[in-house]
Image (cartoon, grey):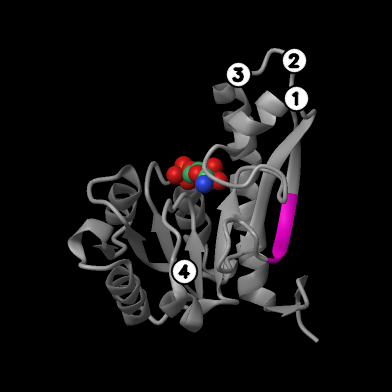
Amino acid sequence: VRLVVLVSGSGSNLQALLDAAADPAYGAEVVAVGADRPAVEGLARAERHGVPTFVARVADFATRDDWDAALLAECSRYKPDLIVSAGFMKLVGPRFLGEYEGRYINTHNALLPAFPGTHGPRDALAYGVKLAGATLHFVDSGVDTGAIIAQVAVPVLDDDTEDTLLERIKVAERRQLVDTVGRMARDGWTVNERKVRLGRG
Ligand code: GRF
């Protein structure tokens, strides 16, 4: 299975996928890495692994729709079976979703539907929840609203700061991403009325 991974930052989730994919038995390979901004660590990680990269900056296009079309075209060059948003901080548009809805997934650092958006761990801490975690989900036109594929919970400890909680979440998040993408690659998946089933038959 051919994966394109989209990043905006450090790319530790991408790194976990690159490491897992080094084993051919994993069933998926990262064929390209894209970003919405240049010079981020995620792109450097890809380059170190000899994986082609591309950058599509919103500011370089006249309209958001033009950017959406360009992102779609860049991804499609690599003929992906699955596209993974791993810390990609942009919402894609209708053109992109028209082609890849059902094959575009995102990892979010909160237990959806609680705490969507860019500050999941901070919002969870402020709310005072005792369990936090990460959600892998399909992307639809909303913000972190698509059908849920997998979730993992971690405890919130009394002395947590945003950083300590985020780090605990990210350890579990990376493991979940690698495990679930591997299962999707090897066994396939179906989605029916928001119910996601991994496996064949
Ligand atoms: C992840 O925790 C993801 O849930 C959030 O941004 C973080 C990206 O981390 N949207 P990294 O770039 O993979 O290290």
Residue of label 4 = 29
- Label at residue 161: 3
**Residues at badges 2 and 4 in contact (C-beta under 8 Å)?**
no
Residue depicted at 37% across the width and 44% down the height? 9
Question: Where's residue 195, x and y in %?
Answer: 79, 72
Q: Amino acid at mark 1?
A: Gly
Q: Are circles 3 and 4 on residues that touch, CB within 8 Å?
A: no
Residue found 65% across the figure and 60% down from its top: 145
Is 168 in front, or is 28? 168
Please state the horizontal and vertical placement of residue 119, each as a whole percent of the image: 55, 37
Residue at the outermost bottom position? 201
State the residue position of label 2.
Answer: 158
> Nearer the observer, disc 2 or disc 1?
1
Q: Is residue 12 visible?
A: no
Q: Which residues are magenta?
A: 147-151
The residue mark sitting in front, 1 or 4, is 1
- What type of secondary structure mainly makes up the magenta span? strand
